[in-house]
Image: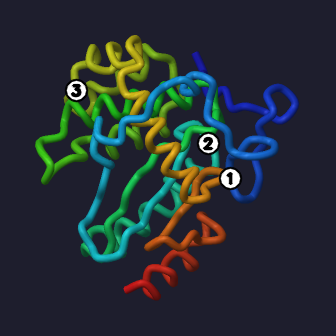
Amino acid sequence: MHRRSFLTLAGTGATLSVAGCTSLLEASIPDELENVEPASDQLPTPTLGSGPVTVDVYEDFGCPVCHEFQADVFPILEREFIESDDIEYRHYDFPVGAADESVAMANAARAVQDATRVDEDEPTGAFFEYKAAVIDNDDWSDEELAALAAGVDVEPDAVSSALENETYYPTLVADWERGEDAGVEGTPTVIVDGEEVDDALDIDEIEQTVEDAT
């Protein structure tokens, strides 16, 4: 069954714009997370590279513009800056309800991270591989999110349990509050060494901002 149930302006109060996915007036945390206490120490931040320049990316797994970023921008950043350790690339969850399954997908990805991370020196595990698989998939049901875990050598039950118990909601809320404090209003948002780029899909702007920060 096809589950790419993106929210629309008429039905839910969400909107898509050139800047990305955001709510009608301002970014608001999804209802599922409203009464959850944040826990910034529940899981480390998914990170690639260890360079001197930080690139923080705030995303909603269900945001179509985040999918564009994943397809068109991330591979260039990986090739030009991450593999050479020029930057430290950090993923933060900022679910704005771009899809009905936005929170579930983020929660599932954190379950995979937790199941595959080694220690503080290798805190990310298979998070990014699983994230790419989820974005590329057409079915975002709980059953399929669990099944996809097998592709990164994680028992599907680990994801199923996290989905049932809402295990990593405290991490998602902590990320969301961090983004709110940083002035994030939609997804994707890219912040290079504390400076938000105007257009997260403009690779030239991101590259220039990174070079200026080096």
Q: Which residue is mark 3?
A: 154
Residue type at mark 1 is Gly
Q: Residue at x 35, y 75 (%)?
A: 53
Q: Residue at x 41, y 23 (%)?
A: 145
**Spot occupied by residue 35 in the image (x, y as percentages of width and height):** 54, 23
Q: Which residue is mark 1?
A: 20
Q: Is residue 157 above or below residue 67?
A: above
Q: Is residue 161 above or below residue 213?
A: above
Q: Secondary structure at mark 3?
A: loop
Q: Is residue 78 left or right of residue 134?
A: left
Q: Nearer the viewer, mark 3 or mark 1?
A: 1
Residue type at mark 2 is Cys
- The answer for how far apart the CA atoms under marks 3 and 1 are is 31 Å
Which of marks 2 and 3 precedes in the sequence?
A: 2
Circle 2: is it few (<14), some (14-19), or many (20+) Cα within 10 Å?
Answer: many
Q: Residue at x 58, y 27 (%)?
A: 34
- The answer for how far apart the CA atoms under marks 3 and 2 are is 25 Å
Q: Nearer the viewer, residue 205 or 129?
A: 205
Q: Residues at badges 2 and 1 in contact (C-beta under 8 Å)? A: yes
**Spot occupied by residue 98 in the image (x, y as percentages of width and height):** 65, 36
Q: Which residue is mark 2?
A: 63
Q: Secondary structure at mark 1?
A: strand
Which of marks 1 and 3 precedes in the sequence?
A: 1
